Structures are given as structure tokens and as C-alpha cells.
């Protein structure tokens, strides 16, 4: 068959670069948007950041030499205007800072700089270096510290540590490994390197004064009745220890002061910061949504470069400036479109969830993405992009926009109740329950049914677990 040319009429959907950029900016979080704007400022010379008016109008007042503090004055006196070519920065630094550093005396106690710790092992190694160990004991201590997990427990047996440290030249006894372990277990935090929860708690009790009330009884409970303590079987525990209910409560209060995971207090978790995109304030009887002006830097087209595009004589320069000018305008337009869409969607969410802002989570209405999509006349996928990793600052806290969407549960009267509202009701019931007789999932379902909310016991258990509320047998405690 010979190749031929044919003309056909048809329709196809194409995404322009401008539309692709607008969609990409729409789904970025605030922190990602800040990085995107900074990258655009670095790559496009026709974009510039708008300076704060206060910074532009307030000139920097010159400081008089008499107003400088001692360190500034010393730096002025010691630092020459011009340095010789062969001057090293070590010489300049030592000349200006030697006196402020202060002498270090041999008798001074070493202070641990906690902010330099990356993990639990670093903290324990720092203490090990300050402890007078022999070379062999230091090797054993190092092997023990390497075998400690994030919670602070020893993950290998003493026999394995003995085999790891022993060699043809040196034979390590198991008793020596045990002795070094006892010393490590009294490092901070106390109870570290324990082989069980029982051993960890007993080590911590050993740090208390022998005259402490209920100390011996607490040791007995941990040593002899750890299973009953874990199951919260207080009735059997009181019978076996022959303690009155009031006395047993004193013993349990002492045990609850102990830390079953001593390593968790040392590990530094990285803080997650959230910058709200919008804020909600009440003006009169109406809730108003406002964009956060500080969520991203404001940018504009550099007028000086824009004027060069009109006056440029070289065709190459003209093409370069005009192409970057067009990109700058597209980028600013995409940012404006993002802000308009975000404000429109957030305002619609607030309008739909008026009850939440007035009364809290119990008044939350069931709402899905399609409800907002129909209200603002946008596609559901657009609403999903707008509400992902976007946050709203309210008088009740900071919430992701996704928080306001939830499924519904039918009520007895034919209405609907939000799953978020049901979770709030479950939390309220558990908070108000009798600690000696906590509510079971079936009882919570019955109480909700009395309010016309029909929820299965299995659903109650799922909602309770999502709230990190333990089951009733684990919530039971003595009053």
C-alpha cells in the first residue's frame, strides 16, 4: 500500500505549559511553594521579591562607637581595614576572641551539649568516655551500647556479647560482662540496657531512697505479679498482695512514675512545622476566610528589566528579555490563580461547616470532595489538590483542609451524622467515664443509639483505635 496524505477533523485536549504550571503550583504545600518561588527568583532575572515597606522607609541609623558593646568595640580596635595577603583567618579569629573564650581548667566538670546528640548511642558513648573503664571493660561497654535499641533495651544476650569481645589473646568471663552491664544500666537515663520491662522498672526503683513509702510493695508487684499488672487485673492483684484498695492505689501511683521505655526521652525527633495557608476569623456574626500574607514571598516583575525589553537594540537581547518577561508574567498569573482557588475552596468549606466553628467537632457535618466541587463549579480532582497539605488557622487550632471532609452515618431519624462528630462523641464519653468501670465498645454503641446514632460495635472499635484510645480493660484503673 502506498503512503497517502489524509485530512481529518477531530477534537483533542492539550495542556499548555501555563496550565501545567498552574496545576503543579496548586498541589504544592506552603514550604514547597516557597522553594519554588525562590528557584524562580534565582533563574529569572525579571522576577524580584517585593520588599517590606517598613524596611524600605526606615533607614539604618549609624551607630556611634560609644554605643557599641565591648565585643564590637574590640573587633573595631583589633581588626584592620585591610589585611595582608598572607594573613590567615585563624590569626584574625584568635586575636578577637581569645579573651572571650575564657580559660579551661582541668578541674571543671564536663557538660554534655544535648543539642549535638543525634541518637541514644551518642549520649551513652559520651557517658562511657567519662567513666573510668579499663580497656577490656570499655570494649564490653561499647558492645553493650551498640546492642541497645531506640527504646533503651538490650537486644542481644550476654553470651553473644561475650563471644564478640573475646579473642584468642583475651578470654572474657560472663561475670565480667554482667558487671559492666550493671554499670551501663546506671547511666542516664536509668534503666537503660535492661533485658525486659521488669528489669528496667526494678533498676529505676533501685534509685529511690530505701525509706520511700510503698517501695518494697512496688518491688513485689513488679517482681512477682508483672502479668497481673500488665492486664490491669487489680482485683486479683489486691488479693495476692493482701493490700487494701487504697494501699494498692499508692503502689500503682509509684509504679506509674517509672519509664518503661527509657530511651524514648533521649531521641530527638525532628520538629514538623506547619505554616497555615488561610486563617478564619469571626467578624460580627460571620466567619471570614483570609489568605495568610506571610505564607509565601510576594514577587513582581522587575520594571528596570521590563523597560530594557522595549529599548533593547540587539535582537538576541530582546528575545532573551521578552522570553523571561513572558515566563515571569505566567508565573505570577499562576500564583494568583492558586490563591484565588484556595480562597474560594476554603470559603466554601467554612460556609458548609459553620457548626464546627461555633460548637466544635461534635457539630461537624458529613461532607465529601464532590460537595465542594459542585458548590464552586470545579472538578473533584482540583478540590483534592487544593485541600492536600493546605492548612487553615482557626480559633480551635490549625487543621488540614482534608480534616473537614468525612463520611456519614445514618441516624434513626433519617438524618446523617459525620464520622468526625462520632469520634468526638466517643472521645467525650470515654473522658467522662468511671475509671473503675470503663465503657466497653458495646456500651458506647448503646449510648450513641440513645442519641439516635446507629453505629456497630466493630465501627466503634475502629473509631476508638483511630483516636489512640485503648480498650476498656486497659483503661481500667483504681480511683
Image (tube, rainbow, N blue to C red):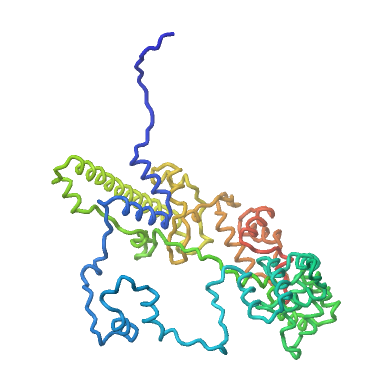
**On-image quarter of the N terminus:** top left
**On-image quarter of the C terminus:** bottom right
Q: Nearer the viewer, residue 191 or 183?
A: 183
Residue 126 percent coordinates (x, y): 61, 75
Q: In this rendering, is residue 240 above or below 426?
A: below
Residue located farthest toward the front when viewing the structure as drawn: 86
Q: Quadrant of residue 144?
A: bottom right
Residue 148 percent coordinates (x, y): 69, 67
Q: Nearer the viewer, residue 49 or 378?
A: 49
Q: Quadrant of residue 423?
A: bottom right
Residue 96 percent coordinates (x, y): 36, 81
Query: Left of 468 or right of it: where is 347?
Result: left
Q: Nearer the viewer, residue 267 or 251?
A: 267
- Residue, x 50% and y 63% (percent of image)? 272
Residue located farthest toward the top when viewing the structure as drawn: 1
Query: Left of 53 or right of it: where is 202?
Result: right
Amino acid at each position: 500500500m502506498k503512503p497517502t496524505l489524509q485530512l481529518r477533523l477531530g477534537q483533542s485536549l492539550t495542556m499548555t505549559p501555563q496550565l501545567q504550571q498552574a496545576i503543579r503550583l496548586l498541589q504544592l504545600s506552603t514550604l514547597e511553594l516557597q522553594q519554588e518561588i525562590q528557584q524562580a527568583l534565582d533563574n529569572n532575572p525579571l522576577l524580584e521579591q517585593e520588599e517590606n515597606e517598613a524596611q524600605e522607609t526606615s533607614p539604618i541609623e549609624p551607630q556611634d562607637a560609644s554605643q557599641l558593646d565591648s565585643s564590637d568595640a574590640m573587633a573595631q580596635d583589633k581588626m584592620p581595614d585591610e589585611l595582608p595577603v598572607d594573613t590567615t583567618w585563624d590569626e584574625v579569629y584568635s586575636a578577637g576572641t581569645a579573651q572571650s573564650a575564657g580559660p579551661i581548667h582541668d578541674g571543671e566538670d564536663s557538660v554534655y551539649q544535648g543539642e549535638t546528640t543525634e541518637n541514644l548511642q551518642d549520649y551513652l558513648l559520651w557517658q562511657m568516655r567519662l567513666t573510668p573503664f579499663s580497656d577490656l571493660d570499655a570494649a564490653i561497654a561499647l558492645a553493650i551500647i551498640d546492642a541497645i535499641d531506640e527504646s533503651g533495651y538490650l537486644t542481644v544476650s550476654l553470651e553473644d556479647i561475650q563471644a564478640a569481645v573475646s579473642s584468642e589473646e583475651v578470654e572474657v568471663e560472663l561475670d565480667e560482662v554482667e558487671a559492666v552491664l550493671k554499670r551501663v544500666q546506671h547511666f542516664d537515663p536509668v534503666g537503660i540496657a535492661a533485658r525486659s520491662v521488669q528489669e528496667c522498672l526494678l533498676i529505676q526503683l533501685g534509685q529511690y531512697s530505701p525509706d520511700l513509702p510503698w517501695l518494697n510493695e512496688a518491688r513485689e508487684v513488679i517482681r512477682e505479679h508483672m502479668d497481673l499488672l500488665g492486664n490491669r487485673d487489680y482485683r486479683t492483684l489486691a488479693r495476692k498482695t493482701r493490700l487494701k484498695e487504697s494501699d494498692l492505689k499508692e503502689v500503682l501511683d509509684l509504679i506509674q512514675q517509672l519509664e518503661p521505655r527509657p530511651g524514648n526521652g533521649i531521641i530527638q525527633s525532628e520538629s514538623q512545622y506547619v505554616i497555615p495557608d488561610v486563617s478564619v476569623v469571626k467578624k460580627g456574626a460571620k466567619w471570614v476566610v483570609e489568605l495568610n500574607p506571610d505564607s509565601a514571598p510576594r514577587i513582581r516583575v522587575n520594571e528596570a528589566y521590563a523597560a530594557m525589553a522595549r529599548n533593547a537594540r540587539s535582537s538576541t537581547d530582546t528575545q532573551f528579555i521578552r522570553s523571561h518577561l513572558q515566563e515571569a508574567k505566567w508565573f505570577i498569573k499562576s500564583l494568583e490563580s492558586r490563591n484565588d482557588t484556595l480562597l474560594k475552596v476554603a470559603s466554601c468549606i467554612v460556609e458548609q461547616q459553620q457548626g464546627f466553628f461555633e460548637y466544635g467537632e461534635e457539630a461537624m457535618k458529613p461532607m465529601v470532595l464532590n460537595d465542594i466541587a459542585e458548590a464552586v463549579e470545579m472538578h473533584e480532582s482540583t478540590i483534592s489538590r487544593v485541600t492536600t497539605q493546605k492548612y487553615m488557622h482557626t480559633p480551635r487550632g490549625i487543621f488540614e483542609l482534608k480534616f473537614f471532609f468525612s463520611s456519614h452515618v445514618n441516624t434513626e431519624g433519617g438524618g446523617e451524622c459525620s464520622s468526625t462528630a462520632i469520634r468526638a462523641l466517643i472521645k467525650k464519653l470515654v473522658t467522662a467515664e468511671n475509671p473503675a468501670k470503663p465503657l466497653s465498645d458495646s456500651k458506647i454503641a448503646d449510648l450513641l443509639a440513645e442519641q439516635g446514632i446507629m453505629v456497630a460495635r466493630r465501627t466503634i472499635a475502629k473509631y476508638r483505635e483511630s483516636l489512640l484510645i485503648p480498650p476498656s480493660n486497659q483503661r481500667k484503673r483504681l480511683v
